[in-house]
Image (spheres, rainbow, N blue to C red):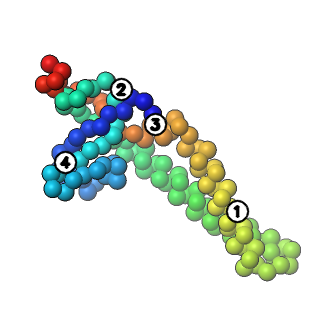
Amino acid sequence: MDNLAEVEITPIASQCEHCPARSLCGTNEHTRKGYLTVKNPLQAKVGDQVEIEIPEDKYQTTLIFIFGTFLIALLGGALAGYLLAFLLNLEPAWLSLTGLIIALIMAGIFVKIKLNQKNKESLWPTIVNILAKGVVNG
């Protein structure tokens, strides 16, 4: 994706614990500085002090969608395999396992299709304000 910037952040320990982008941030324990790749629609330059927005609600709804889809596939596939085994008078353990695996593969394909490029781009942290121009930029 074009138009990205790497932002140096100085995290406050209490804020890091609850930050939805914590897994994306490369924080150095010795310098207490972190680096986060963000969308840069305002064309901030090196040295600018910026405000970033982390789409916490989008992270949460996306995670609920992913885990919910796989949970439904897990239960539905196993149940469908068991019922099919019962109807066909076959070994339920193997058919349940086969149904579970097929359902999980189908759920994976479904999740990949739903999380298209547009959705992935909306999950990036974004620069929303340039607080101060850097020395390099006058």
In the structure shown, which secondary structural element does the residue marked by tag 3 occupy?
helix
The x and y percentages for residue 41 are 35, 26
User: In what quadrant of the picture does the C terminus appear?
Assistant: top left
Residue 94, quarter of picture: bottom right
Amino acid identity at mark 3:
Glu
How would you rate the neighbour count of disc 3 (Cα within 10 Å): few for under 14, some for 14-19, many for 20 or more?
few
Structural distance between the alpha carbons of marks 4 and 1: 45 Å
Q: Residues within 10 Å of mark 2 (few under 14, many from 20)?
A: few
Q: Which residue is mark 1?
A: 102
Q: Are marks 1 and 2 in contact (CB under 8 Å)?
A: no
Cα separation, mark 4 vs mark 2, equals 23 Å
Give the residue number, with chain letter if any, for mark 2: 41
Q: Give whichever of discs 4 and 1 has the lower sequence position.
A: 4
Q: CA distance from mark 1 to mark 2?
A: 42 Å
Query: As displayed, is residue 91 above or below residue 101?
Result: below
Which amino acid is tagged 1? Ile
Q: Residue 121: give its label.
A: 3
